[in-house]
Image (cartoon, helix red, strand yellow):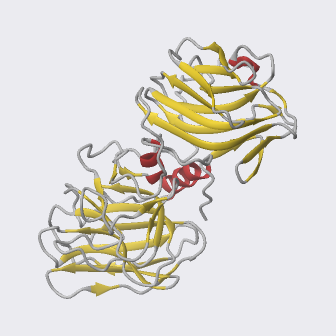
Amino acid sequence: MGAIRPVIRSVIRPVVRSVFGDEADPLAGAVIFDPYRDVQGRNIAPVSPYANNLTISGSSYKETTASAVHGLSCADVSVDTIMCITFIPVGRIRFLLGTTATSWAIFDTSLVSVVAKGANCPTASIVDNGDGGFTATAVVLTATAASTLFLTMPDTATDNTARTFVGDIAKGFNIVTRQQNFGSSLAPYSPILGVPQSLANYGAYGSAISAQNGSAAGADTNDAIFSGLTLIHTTNQYALTTATAFDMRNFSEFITGKFAGTSGVVWSLADSTTTTKYQAIKQAASGKLSIISRNGGAETESAQLDVSTTLNVCLHFSANNGTLTLTNMATGASVTLADTAPTTAPRIAFGAVGSSTVAQIVNSLQWSHSATFRQAKSNPAPAYRKIKSLLAGRGVTVA
């Protein structure tokens, strides 16, 4: 027998893959509009985006018997934030506002006092409202991404490590109002419907790009309505961005929502200086979408794509090498159209063609998320999975 040669193993660095595919963040580099975060940046609607081990009935939140945390996951933040909640205790006297790290406060409703705070919660207070309800407020300082929480706690809890315990189905709380603002000052609570007047760009690209809700900076009849999770368009409502550096011949758009209209345009890239240059998703009929394109001449239109009118659907609309493609990501079905190839610096519009005279306004649209890329995505699946997962965490199910 010959000598046994040693096996020489090379050092191979592992390939780190995200759960969404090969891309670390499949939404990196996009212009992102997110109505939920717009609302969250001002006043969050008085409903929870995500409940942890709670049974919900209207404004009532009761614990389950799980050995776990029991409460609401509020905003995911990476900046200082102030949280405020008005609630009615049910069987519990101690509650926590803040994060699982060092930015938290524990409130005792029987003592009407703050019994403990983490190092990164500089200010907290609780007020007895005299009607069985209490208003708790906490300033939460965080420089890294964290989920903010409102939790029930054991009656003797003095630290956030006590947040995991066996729940009691007779105990919990009722929500009256809930707010959260970025920064360390709290705006007065106001009903969420009808505000805000602008949409922020939460993507890594185009920091100067924002969108105006309606036809003017102030309140007007063209304002789409924020529900807390979505932006709702009915007759004559739309939103328009500032000018972009996008190439209308090479882009990808992912828009997610309910497309229940019968006419008008859902989303478009259009030259704001003329009425004759645009690429758009058209609501062709109930449950039917199509592509329309125009470059100075007549408008061209694709065949129709079937979509649900009741489920949330993610659409992928792209321009690549002279072809426009619209895909229903839930079914994989798609339609195509030869690109008329307008060249201009367009603006994005939701619910209309954003040309010099806003046109083809949609008659019904409810959308939850939009991500626009400066180039066509050859593999849209990772972005679709990321958006679907993101919205699921808020209680929005996407087909």
Q: Looking at the rendering, which quadrant does residue 267 occupy?
A: bottom left
Residue 126: give x, y in percent of width and height. 61, 24
Q: Position of residue 120 (x, y in %)?
A: 52, 15
The N terminus lies in quadrant: top right
Residue 233, image x and y in percent? 42, 69
Q: Is residue 198 visible?
A: yes
Residue found at the far top of this picture: 119
Residue visible at 63% across and 53% down?
395
User: Residue pushed farthest front?
Assistant: 130
The relative height of residue 119 versus residue 344 in the rendered view (above or below) is: above
Q: Looking at the image, which residue is at 63% across and 33% down?
A: 129
Q: Residue 277 placed where, x, y %?
A: 18, 75
Viewer-proximal residue among 100 and 177 = 177
Looking at the rendered image, the quarter that the C terminus falls into is bottom right
Of 279 and 242, which appears nearest the observer?
242
The part of the image, by quadrant, that contains residue 378 is bottom left
Q: In the visual, does 298 lie left or right of 139?
A: left
Count of all numbered marks drawn on residues in the image = 0
Residue at x 48% of width, y 23% of height: 142
The answer to whether residue 17 is seen in the rendering is no
In the displayed structure, does residue 99 sit left or right of residue 357? Answer: right
